[in-house]
Image (spheres, helix red, strand yellow):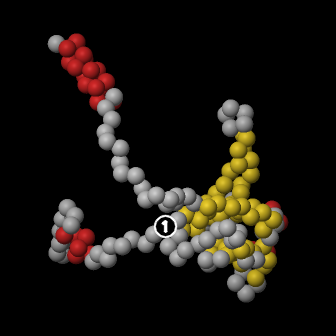
Amino acid sequence: MKQILLFLALSTTFLFSSCEGDPGPPGPPGDDFLAQVFEVDNVNFQYDAESNSYISDFISFPQNVEVFESDVVLAYRYEGTVELNDGTFTDEWSQLPQNIFYQDGTGDIFQYLFINTFVDIRFLIEGNFDLTTLGSNFLDDQIFRVAIVPAQFASADLTMDDIMSNSEIEVINIEN
């Protein structure tokens, strides 16, 4: 009996793993929604005593990069190169915002941030201590990677009542 069940289980697995469904509909012709990525090197920060922060200059997006209101801008900071298990090397990137715990045990934290418009980006460093103590390895010749991800605003204009009535969420009122 166990052998028959095992045979049925294996044959069913084989049968379903070899099935293929109909392909989905093709997307609109000519609509390639690829993100655009560029790198900015030699970014240096200047100290702003009023806000106790470091600020980079505005960095213009390349001429061939067009950013729309609905697009998403992501930024990454270059961390260095690391060796992989197979002996090859690759770059490491950290997504912003990025918190860095400075001088272990002191509670000092600073953060790399960015702000952007449709035409440029600016990088910032903010922290909870006197940032003038930061070393130049955090401030000078930084490398950032910027990705512009195409997106569209959602067309649905739903209220909370619409969402609750169209889902299988049950609201339970708990009285004290």
Residue 23 visible, this angle? yes
Give the camera-side residue of 20 and 160. 20
Q: Amino acid at mark 1?
A: Ala
Query: Residue sitting at 33 percent across and 30 percent down?
Result: 17
- Looking at the image, can residue 111 be seen? no
> Going by the image, does 137 lie left or right of 104?
right
Quadrant in which residue 128 is drawn: bottom right
Q: Residue at x 66, y 55 (%)?
A: 93
Residue at 18 percent of width and 75 percent of height:
176
| Rendering coords of residue 98 (x, y %) | 63, 63
Mark 1 nearby-residue class (10 Å; few <14, some 14–19, many ≥20):
few
Q: Is residue 135 above or below residue 19?
A: below
Is 15 in front, or is 13? 15
SS under mark 1: loop
**If the image is split into quadrants, where does the N terminus sit?**
top left
Q: Is residue 114 left or right of residue 56?
A: left
Tag 1 residue: 151
Percent position of residue 78, x then y: 71, 57
Picture coordinates of residue 63, whole percent (x, y): 70, 71
Residue 90 at x, y = what percent?
70, 44
Where residue 163 sits, quadrant-wise, is bottom left
User: Tag count in the figure?
Assistant: 1
- Residue 137 lies, with reference to residue 82, above or below; the image says below
- Residue lying furthest bottom in this view? 50
Which residue is pictured at 28% across the width and 26% down the height? Answer: 15
Task: Please tell me which residue lies in front, 166 or 83.
Answer: 166
